[in-house]
Amino acid sequence: MRKSNLYYLTISAMFTALIAVGAFIKVPMPLLPFTMQTFFTMLACFILPRNYSSLSAGLYMILGLIGLPIFTSGGGLAYVLTPGFGYLIGFVVANYVAGGFFKHRNSVKPVDYFVAGILNILVVYLCGLGYWYLLANVFTSSSIGLWPLVMNGFLLTLPGDIVKLAVAVPVATKIRRHLMN
């Protein structure tokens, strides 16, 4: 049975709210906190068609930019000048790219979730690290070297993202079975 646009919009809105809640479930780190946002963006990617999973992350970003304090460190337009904003852009891009992995699959196996999850994580990091580097070294007077960037923006948080992926796969399997049938 084909689901309606309203059905997917409702679930997208739910994921927008979950991503916002995930911003407040955090472990402080030196420059960027470890949060549960990536867990919920991965779930959205695994459960929704890619346009809708990107919509959920994009709506989260828009709501924060218009001033709702739903980002890890607040909200508002000034957030575009923080290193973490690139990761928010990455959520939108990653959900679209990794969500495309499921586009033509009738049945999804756990290994498919892992592959899409790794792709999702890599795209988020690519956007996040690239934005942070450009922000620090081109657009502002601060600067960051490649090693501190990789250490603080990737290596310290990657193990947690792998654990979140390992938890997201069985959760997505159960949710998808109930929501999408």
Image (spheres, rainbow, N blue to C red):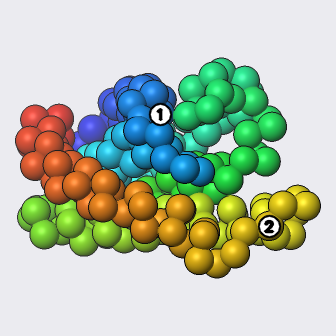
Mark 1 crowdedness (10 Å alpha carbons): few <14, some 14-19, many ≥20: many
Q: Is disc 2 surrounded by few (<14), some (14 to 19) or many (20+) residues within 10 Å? A: some
Query: Looking at numbered disc 1 in the image, what kind of residue is underneath it?
Result: Ala
Residue drawn where x is 10% and y is 35% of the image:
178
* Residue pictured at 79% horizontal, 48% vertical: 81
| Whether residue 173 is visible | no
**Between disc 2 and disc 1, whose residue precedes?**
1
Q: CA distance from mark 2 to mark 1?
A: 26 Å
Residue type highlighted by circle 2 = Ser
Residue closest to the eye, 4 or 144: 144
- The image shows residue 56 at horizontal and vertical percentages of 47, 39
Q: What's the residue at 65%, 21% (across, down)?
A: 68
The N terminus sits in image quarter: top left
* Left or right placement of residue 159 versus residue 150 in this view: left
Q: Secondary structure beneath disc 2?
A: loop
**Rendered location of residue 87, percent (x, y):** 57, 54
Residue at the bottom extreme? 146
Looking at the rendering, which quadrant does residue 11 occupy? top left
Q: Which residue is mark 1?
A: 23
Identify the residue under disc 2: 143
